[in-house]
Amino acid sequence: DEPFQDAPFDGILGLALPRLAEAQDFSFFDSLVRNGSLKRNLFSVFFARGDHEDSEVLFGDVREERLMAPLSWVPVTNPGFWQVELRDLSAGDVPLGVCSASGCPAALDTGTSLLAGPARLIRRLIHGLRVAVDCSNYDTLPDLGFMFNNLTLSLKPSDYVERTNTGCILGFMALEIPMHRGPSFILGDPFLRRYYTAYDRERL
């Protein structure tokens, strides 16, 4: 049935916090928490980087063997989305001034295939990274940093640029979300493929 009749999957499992659910019973993750079904009240996400391994959503625990370093925790600022606060974005070590003095709200979302944000901020970001249309400067492109309060997590150029025979395709998309309804930026697949993430109901 619509809209899944032509899709290779049967539905979408939303894992946002209860505030975004149609009703309390529709929040699958929170149902597991309320029923005491989990070892720990969290879930973790691993995005595979190729066909040689499988992606995974693990409920109730973190698969430690997938970690290259201990998890760093960032507070949730809007307990509807898994939304956190960015201080700014950077090209290498240089802040790009994309965010205001109060920062940029950003949500982590497994259902968004690119890095998304308001058109004006995406334009500023692309200008700061200075990616040549013909990809001639690919080998000297900077890392793209996401600056949290006491932590910067960076993407390599290979994470945010796809190199083709005709040039560069950037992994960004413009998406306008009213400020009172959600985040400025959505950290989708490119970010989640680089970093193992955990979503802890007890750390809101």
Image: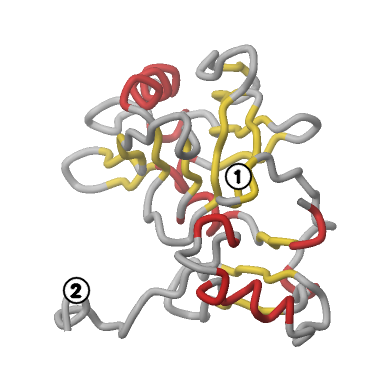
Q: Quadrant of residue 18?
A: bottom right
| Element marked by disc 1 | strand
| Element marked by disc 2 | loop
Q: Residue at x 76, y 65 (%)?
A: 67
* Residue closest to the eye, 8 or 169: 8
**Which residue position is annotated with label 2?**
3
Q: Earlier in the sequence, mark 1 or mark 2?
A: 2
Give percent across and percent down for residue 109: 50, 55
Q: Residues within 10 Å of mark 2 (few under 14, many from 20)?
A: few
The N terminus: image quadrant: bottom left
Give percent across and percent down for residue 177: 37, 36
Give the residue type that dot 2 points to. Pro
**Which residue position is annotated with label 1?**
83
Give percent across and percent down for residue 112: 39, 55
Q: Residue at x 58, y 54 (%)?
A: 194
Give the residue type that dot 1 points to. Gln
- Alpha carbon separation for disc pair 1 and 2: 27 Å
Left or right of residue 53: residue 167: left
Q: Quadrant of residue 104?
A: top right
Is 202 situated above or below 6? above
Q: Residue at x 57, y 70 (%)?
A: 24
